């Protein structure tokens, strides 16, 4: 999970914690063991370059995805409207 950048379009490999940005997010709840009632927290990493203009968010049905940083507020508002 932390072997490479979480941006699907980027192939940067995770080598050092001090580069880029590490995110701790809820993984897909449907992937959690049934009846456990707990969402698994997972670590995701964006390389330095991707972290400059992207961030990671969890979207039900999609899992953890990368979005442009400027659209974070907009996306949060859209999610609240669901
Ligand atoms: Zn990257």
Image: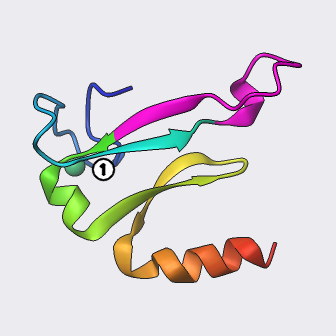
**Image quadrant containing the N terminus:** top left
Magenta region includes residue 41: yes
Q: Any atom of ligand 1 within 8 Å of the CB at mark 1?
A: yes
**Place of residue 43 in the rendered image (x, y in percent of width and height, measured from the top left):** 41, 33
**Place of residue 82 in the rendered image (x, y in percent of width and height, measured from the top left):** 81, 72
**Place of residue 74 in the rendered image (x, y in percent of width and height, measured from the top left):** 55, 83
Secondary structure, mark 1, is loop
Q: Is 15 left or right of 10, judged from the image as shown?
A: left
Q: Is 18 left or right of 81, judged from the image as shown?
A: left
Total numbered circles = 1
Q: Is 44 left or right of 11, judged from the image as shown?
A: right
Please determine whether, in this image, residue 16 is positioned above or below residue 48.
above
For image coordinates 52% across by 80% down, the residue present is 73
Please determine whether, in this image, residue 33 is positioned above or below residue 25.
above
Which residue in the protein does label 1 denote?
Answer: 9
Quarter of the image for residue 78 reads: bottom right
Q: Nearer the viewer, residue 51 or 38?
A: 38
Residue stretch rendered in magenta on the structure: 28-44
Please determine whether, in this image, residue 48 is positioned above or below residue 44.
below
Quarter of the image for residue 67 reads: bottom left
């Amino acid at each position: 999970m932390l072997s490479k950048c979480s941006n699907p379009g980027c192939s940067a490999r995770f080598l050092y914690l001090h580069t880029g940005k590490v995110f701790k997010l809820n993984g897909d709840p449907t992937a959690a063991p049934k009846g456990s009632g707990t969402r698994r927290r997972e670590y995701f990493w964006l390389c330095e370059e991707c972290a400059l203009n992207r961030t990671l968010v969890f979207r039900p049905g999609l899992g953890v995805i990368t979005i442009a940083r400027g659209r974070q507020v907009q996306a949060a508002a859209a999610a609240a409207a669901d």
